[in-house]
């Protein structure tokens, strides 16, 4: 229990630090939402000043941060100048769409990475392993932007997949099964882009973890006793290599959330990516801060999930936690 409490405290302090730095950098950046109004001769300077006072942009920085923290505690996360509404409801809708995309991509990426990594480690140094290593090395050097644009061009030319959005026109009139099918079709291209971008790193980590374990004395002894190779790989080697892979699971979820922002913008997926881009261009301060904080929450949540899985999978961690 102390182990989990300590991890939760670390997560809270991390979120607190990220919120302070994000608020500070966003506030000290030149320009704000009302700067363009000053250039408009039809808007009086007094009107701009009254709007700044209304949204409390003329208050000292600590006071504004304290009011923002209070709004976070109430689920509002500040006020959006562009949308004229609290930031929280705007972000939660977009965050749901981003999580749908990234969780699906994470599950598919790991479902492919585990068997490929095991297969590569089992044939270490031979032709299948070299071929897979060259393939993953090639995929690693392809930028996410180029990959997303390539898939988008393929969709435009083939007409097989939608080129943007999350649902089709007339979505509300579809049956529940057809609604799921429609969402799945719209998700295909962004999910494929995220899986291809994450797969090389995951395969290489699985391969490295298993290759290190396969040289362990207990596995050589088990092989000497005639235990089949397949059973050694899936039942013993994979379990022995589980700790670094579980830690990588939490990290991969956070990196996919960050990587999905670019894919969402390119493929017009209504997630956090397009909203953050619009907020940055419009200098919508509290939407930017809320989006960054929400992305950090996803990363911290993924790492906390990995900590829970490590506590469940490794009795040594439970023993150390119980001895504290």
Image (tube, helix red, strand yellow):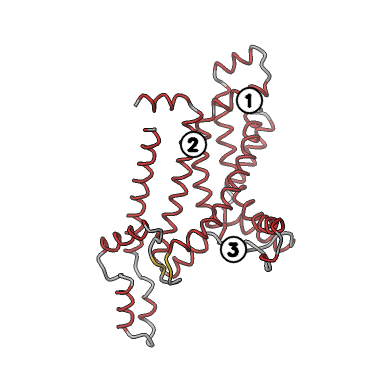
Q: Residue at x 48, y 43 (%)?
A: 302
Identify the secondary structure beneath mark 2.
Answer: helix
Identify the secondary structure beneath mark 3.
Answer: loop
Q: Are marks 3 and 1 in contact (CB under 8 Å)?
A: no
Q: Name the residue carrying label 3.
A: 268
Q: Residue furthest top?
A: 225
Marks 2 and 3, how far apart at CA: 31 Å
Q: Are marks 2 and 1 in contact (CB under 8 Å)?
A: no
Marks 3 and 1, how far apart at CA: 42 Å
Quadrant of res 235: top right
Quadrant of res 69: bottom left
Q: Nearer the viewer, residue 20 or 39?
A: 20
Q: Residue at x 49, y 47 (%)?
A: 254
Q: Position of residue 143 (x, y in %)?
A: 57, 52
Identify the secondary structure beneath mark 1.
Answer: helix
Task: Give left or right: position of 110 versus 289.
Answer: right
Is 304 rendered above or below residue 58?
above
Quadrant showing the N terminus: top left
Indicate which disc residue 90 carries.
none
Q: Position of residue 214 (x, y in %)?
A: 58, 23
Q: Name the residue carrying label 2.
A: 247
Q: Position of residue 207 (x, y in %)?
A: 59, 32
Dot 1, crowdedness within 10 Å: few (<14), some or many (≥20)? many
Quadrant of res 304: top left
Between discs 2 and 3, the one toward the N terminus: 2
Q: Position of residue 124 (x, y in %)?
A: 63, 28
Is 122 rendered above or below residue 145?
above
Indicate which disc residue 233 carries.
1
């Amino acid at each position: 229990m102390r182990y989990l409490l300590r991890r939760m405290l670390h997560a809270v302090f991390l979120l607190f630090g990220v919120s302070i730095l994000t608020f500070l950098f966003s506030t000290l950046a030149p320009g704000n939402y009302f700067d363009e109004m000053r250039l408009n001769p039809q808007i009086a300077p007094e009107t701009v000043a009254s709007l700044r006072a209304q949204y409390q942009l003329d208050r000292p920085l600590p006071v504004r941060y304290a009011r923002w923290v209070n709004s976070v505690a109430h689920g509002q996360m500040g006020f959006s100048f562009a949308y004229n509404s609290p930031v929280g409801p705007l972000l939660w809708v977009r965050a749901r769409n981003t999580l749908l995309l990234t969780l699906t991509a994470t599950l598919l990426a790991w479902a492919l990475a585990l068997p490929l990594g095991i297969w590569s480690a089992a044939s270490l140094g031979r032709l299948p392993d070299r071929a897979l290593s060259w393939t993953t090395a090639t995929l690693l050097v392809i930028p996410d932007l180029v990959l997303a644009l390539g898939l988008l061009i393929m969709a435009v030319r083939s007409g097989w997949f939608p080129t943007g959005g999350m649902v089709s026109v007339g979505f509300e009139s579809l049956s529940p099964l057809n609604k799921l099918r429609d969402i799945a079709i719209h998700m295909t291209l962004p999910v494929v882009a995220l899986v291809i971008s994450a797969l090389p790193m995951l395969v290489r980590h699985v391969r490295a973890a298993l290759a290190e374990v396969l040289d362990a004395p207990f596995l050589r002894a088990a092989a000497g006793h005639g235990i089949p190779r397949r059973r050694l790989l899936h039942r013993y080697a994979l379990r022995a290599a589980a700790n670094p892979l579980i830690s990588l699971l939490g990290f991969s979820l956070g990196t996919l959330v960050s990587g999905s922002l670019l894919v969402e913008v390119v493929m017009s997926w209504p997630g956090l990516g397009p909203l953050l881009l619009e907020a940055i261009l419009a200098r919508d301060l509290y939407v930017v801060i809320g989006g960054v904080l929400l992305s950090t929450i996803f990363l911290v949540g993924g790492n906390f999930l990995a900590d829970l899985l490590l506590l469940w999978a490794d009795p040594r961690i439970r023993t150390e936690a119980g001895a504290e």
